[in-house]
Image: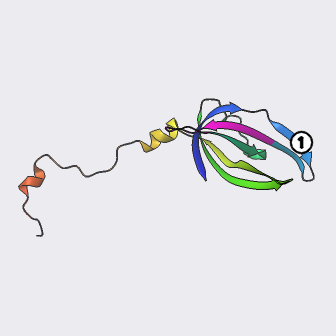
């Protein structure tokens, strides 16, 4: 899944050691755009953490998976990012160029009388 949202908070980096070695996790809070903005906590794991992209106030394009798991009879849901890239203004500028549409001179359509019916 993908999400484009504004970064509103970077939570403290979490690190630890597990059976597979050292790990690190960065949680961020992003806010969606629209009439009813929503805040979402997104987790970024390991080498996918890029501090240069994580600037509060910047727009991000986030590719993520949603996963739920049960623990002691309760369910917990994680939003895990597998790609975080700068987005928003720079990405919108690339796609906001003129659309290729045919140009017709004013009155040019009226001069022709070659309709097939």
Say which quarter of the image contains residue 55: top right
* 99 to the left or right of 28: left
Say which quarter of the image contains residue 28: top right
Q: Position of residue 108 (x, y in %)?
A: 11, 51
Q: Position of residue 44 (x, y in %)?
A: 73, 44
Please tell me how crowded label 1 is: few (under 14), some (14-19), or many (20+) other residues with Cα within 10 Å: few
Residue 27 shown in magenta = yes
Q: Nearer the viewer, residue 53 or 58?
A: 58
Q: Position of residue 45 (x, y in %)?
A: 77, 46
> Where are the magenta residues, as a range?
25-38
Outermost residue, bottom side: 117
Q: Nearer the viewer, residue 42 or 24?
A: 42
Q: Quadrant of the C terminus?
A: bottom left
Q: Position of residue 40 (x, y in %)?
A: 65, 41
Q: Residue at x 91, y 45 (%)?
A: 17
Residue 15 shown in magenta = no
In the picture of the structure, the residue carrying the numbered disc 1 is 16
């Amino acid at each position: 899944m993908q999400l484009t949202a504004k970064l509103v908070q970077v939570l403290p980096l979490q690190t630890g050691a597990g059976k597979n070695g050292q790990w690190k996790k960065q949680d961020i809070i992003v806010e969606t755009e629209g009439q009813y903005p929503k805040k979402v906590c997104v987790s970024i794991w390991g080498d996918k953490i890029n501090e240069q992209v994580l600037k509060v106030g910047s727009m991000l394009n986030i590719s993520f998976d949603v996963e739920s798991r049960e623990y002691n009879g309760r369910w917990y849901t994680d939003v895990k990012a597998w790609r975080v890239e700068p987005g928003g203004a720079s990405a919108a500028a690339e796609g906001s160029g003129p659309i290729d549409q045919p140009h017709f001179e004013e009155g040019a359509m009226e001069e022709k009388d070659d309709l097939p019916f």
